[in-house]
Image (tube, rainbow, N blue to C red):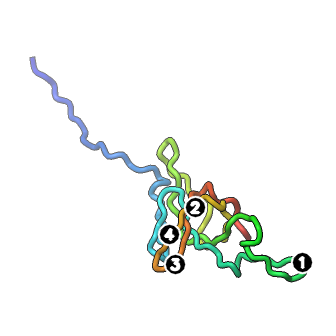
Amino acid sequence: MKKSKKKVSKSTKKSAPKSATKVLQKSSIGVTPLGDRVLIKPLSAEESATMSAFGILIPDTAKEKPEQGTVVAVGPGRRGEDGSIMPVSVHVGERVMFSKYGYDEIKVGGVEYLILPEASILAVIE
């Protein structure tokens, strides 16, 4: 009795989902966040201060409000349960408002940046 040999394909490579092959935007400072994290340069006191109706400058230290900054770099996005990547909804260059305590501070080249998850971003300022 002869045993029949079946030809077995050794191709076990799984192709990545089409959304995972998205080309990442390189950061101008050399730091690219992972997952759904966003790198933000906080606004200076002059940029984020507001004027009262009488022209008085109200600094951020005198009022309770969320922080603001400019998006410098964005990660590829969060992975879904099926393995696909859900892209981050903010883009480089946008001015955003984010949660006061939801970030980590980092320094790159002597400049302070904040890195935070997309969920900590409250709004895009237009």
Q: What element carries label 3?
A: strand
Decide which of tag 2 and tag 3 comes sooner along the chain.
2
Q: Mark 1 points at which residue?
A: 53
Residue 104 lies left or right of residue 67; in this view the side is left
Q: Residue 108 carries which label?
A: none
Label 3 – label 1 distance at C-alpha:
34 Å
Q: Position of residue 120 (x, y in %)?
A: 63, 57
- Camera-nearest residue between 22 and 81: 81
Three-letter code for the amino acid on which mark 4 is drawn: Ile
- Camera-nearest residue between 30 and 62: 62
Three-letter code for the amino acid on which mark 1 is drawn: Ala
Q: Residue at x 47, y 59 (%)?
A: 34
Q: Where is residue 52 in the image (x, y as percent from the top left)?
A: 86, 77
Decide which of tag 4 and tag 3 comes sooner along the chain.
4
Q: Is mark 4 on a helix, strand or loop?
A: strand
Q: Mark 3 points at which residue?
A: 111
- How many tags in the picture? 4
Rendered view: 5 above or below 54: above
Q: Mark 2 points at which residue?
A: 103
Q: Extreme top residue here?
A: 1
In contact (CB < 8 Å): disc 4 and disc 3: no
Q: Position of residue 47 (x, y in %)?
A: 70, 79
User: Crowdedness of circle 4 by 10 Å Cα count: few (<14), some, many (20+)?
Assistant: few
